[in-house]
């Protein structure tokens, strides 16, 4: 089992130490930073999850999260905000920035540990790396994608996808349980192209849904946030 690395960023040193102690008891490897500026001096791409306070020094937790979300090497790292700013507006702002969870202070350590486990289960970094297996197969029930042969099978029949449709499907399957913004999809799939409209992404996903038949319903839209692949659809 992987020993997940967690970074706790909070200007309350005693709180950092409490979280570090309890998370390490759960088997995680934990580092701490007492400001967002200090955190930015670390190799952030090496962490699997970050617990971040909002109100810190000159660079707030929100500002720190925005920086992470703009860089390809850190854009998919789960972020949990732990903060005394508990208004609905603050929570919406944090989630809009790309937070995976939002915990209001004061909180119980047991709750934080439980939230960490939950977020890691949902995140790409917390999943078993089946998408990178030697045979290149990503399988979900009767949906099978071969990243080496660049083909997609639905219930045993090959489905013809364009290159962009294929790349989007692979990205969503690798990040299942996570909502990806259009900007994140754009950077990962159209990384070398300059002008891509949101509508272009929407059209590709609409076409792909139709081609995938019953599995198209698993590609969900979160209005105002983006797209994701959910294993269970209501």
Image (cartoon, grey):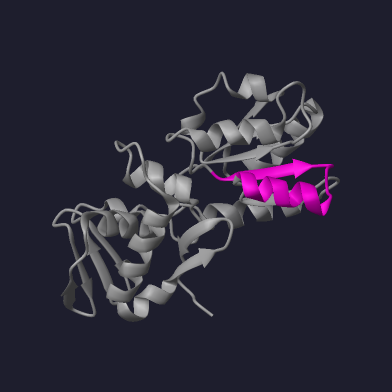
**Residue 27 x %, y %:** 57, 44
**Residue 109 can be seen, yes or no:** no
**Residue 59 can be seen, yes or no:** yes
Q: In the rendered image of this protein, does residue 21 appear above or below residue 135?
A: above
Q: Residue furthest left?
A: 149
**Residue 213 x %, y %:** 31, 79
Identity of the residue drawn at 63% across and 50% down: 116
Q: Is residue 13 left or right of residue 79?
A: right
Identity of the residue drawn at 58% across and 54% down: 119
Toward the viewer: 168 or 110?
168
Quarter of the picture containing the C terminus is bottom right
Q: In the rendered image of this protein, does residue 149 appear above or below residue 37?
A: below
**Residue 47 x %, y %:** 51, 35
Q: Which residues are magenta?
A: 78-97
Identity of the residue drawn at 50% across and 51% down: 181
Q: In the rendered image of this protein, does residue 3 appear above or below residue 211?
A: above
Residue 155 lies in the magenta stretch: no
Q: Is residue 173 left or right of residue 14?
A: left
Residue 82 lies in the magenta stretch: yes
Identity of the residue drawn at 65% across and 20% down: 37
């Amino acid at each position: 089992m992987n020993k997940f690395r967690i970074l706790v960023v909070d200007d309350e040193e005693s709180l950092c130490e409490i979280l570090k102690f309890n998370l390490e008891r759960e088997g995680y490897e934990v580092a701490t930073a007492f400001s967002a500026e200090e955190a930015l001096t670390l190799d952030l791409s090496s962490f699997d999850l970050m617990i971040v306070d909002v109100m810190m020094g000159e660079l707030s937790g929100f500002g720190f999260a925005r920086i992470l979300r703009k860089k390809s090497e850190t854009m998919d790292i789960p972020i949990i905000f732990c903060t005394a700013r508990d208004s609905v507006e603050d929570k919406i702002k944090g989630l809009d920035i790309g937070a995976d969870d939002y915990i209001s202070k004061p909180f119980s350590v047991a709750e934080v540990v439980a939230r960490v486990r939950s977020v890691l289960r949902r995140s790409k970094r917390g999943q078993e790396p089946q998408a990178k297996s030697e045979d290149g197969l990503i399988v979900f029930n009767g949906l099978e994608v071969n990243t080496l042969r660049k083909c997609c099978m639905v219930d045993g029949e090959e489905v013809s996808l364009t290159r962009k449709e294929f790349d989007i499907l692979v990205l969503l399957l690798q990040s299942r349980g996570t909502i990806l913004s259009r900007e994140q999809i754009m950077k990962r799939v159209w990384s070398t192209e300059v002008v891509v409209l949101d509508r272009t992404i929407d059209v590709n996903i609409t076409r792909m849904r139709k081609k995938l038949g019953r599995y198209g319903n698993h590609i969900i839209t979160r209005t105002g946030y983006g797209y994701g692949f959910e294993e269970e659809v209501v």
